Amino acid sequence: VLSDASIMALVRAEKLVIRPFTLDALGPVSYDVTLGEILLKFDPNIVDLTCDQSAQCREVPLVDGRWFLEPGRLYLGALAEYVHIPDDLVGFLHGRSTLARAGITIHQQAGLLDAGWRGHATIEISVVYPTWLHPGNPIGQVTFERLTTRVRRPYSGRYQSDTKPTPGKPFVREVGP
């Protein structure tokens, strides 16, 4: 796991990109990230992973500069920060203890930022209690680990270069001979 000094050295060398980058967000072994400007509510009749989930999402309106989240619902947000992971690192998105203590989960199981991934990561938010969240709220932290070797095939998947919360895209299976 990279230390603050290692994260800072990679950012200065422009090998690891985090924009905007502020020293206040740099922790001993992580970088704090914030919630972006758009929040979607995922409200499906039924989940079918062979179909695009976009039609089952709607944007949550701001009320007095904040969003109201209901328990038992899934919301999709995106990090305000643009991150580009080099091909010899992997990033892991984690929740923050303050949010966890308030019953707020920021990712269901999708906290991996693969080597070569870039964009504004989508986060899956759920709450235990009725909750207000604001754009720009500290929402999570990312840790980075060095790989034993550079990857042969950096990430180039369906969520590469996301700029806003991205609903699930369909799984496509290749049919063999």
Image: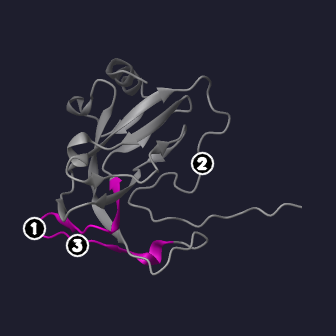
- In the rendered view of the protein, which quadrant contains the C terminus? bottom right
Residue 169 position by quadrant: bottom right
Q: Earlier in the sequence, mark 3 or mark 2?
A: 3
Seen in the image, is 48 located left or right of residue 165?
right
- The amino acid marked with disc number 3 is Pro
Query: Label 2 to label 1, Cα distance in Å?
Result: 38 Å
For the residues carrying marks 3 and 2, which lies nearer the camera in this image? 3
The residue shown at (59%, 67%) is 170
Q: Is residue 15 visible?
A: no
Mark 3–mark 2 Cα distance, whole angstroms, equals 32 Å
Q: Is residue 113 left or right of residue 20?
A: right
60 and 108: which one is in front?
Answer: 108
What residue does disc 1 label?
A: 64
Residue 44 position, x and y percent, is 43, 77
Tell me the residue that label 2 is attached to: 156
The N terminus sits in image quarter: top left
Kind of residue at badge 2: Ser
Q: Earlier in the sequence, mark 2 or mark 1?
A: 1
Say whether residue 136 is magenta. no
Is disc 2 placed on a helix, strand or loop?
loop
Mark 2 Cα-neighbour bin, 10 Å: few <14, some 14–19, many ≥20: few
Residue flagged by tag 1: what amino acid is it? Asp
Identified at 84% across, 60% down, the residue is 176
Residue under the image location 36 percent in, 24 percent down: 12
From which residue to which does the magenta span run?
A: 53-78
* Residue drawn at (29%, 35%) of the image: 21
Display colour scheme: one colour
Mark 3 highlights which residue? 61
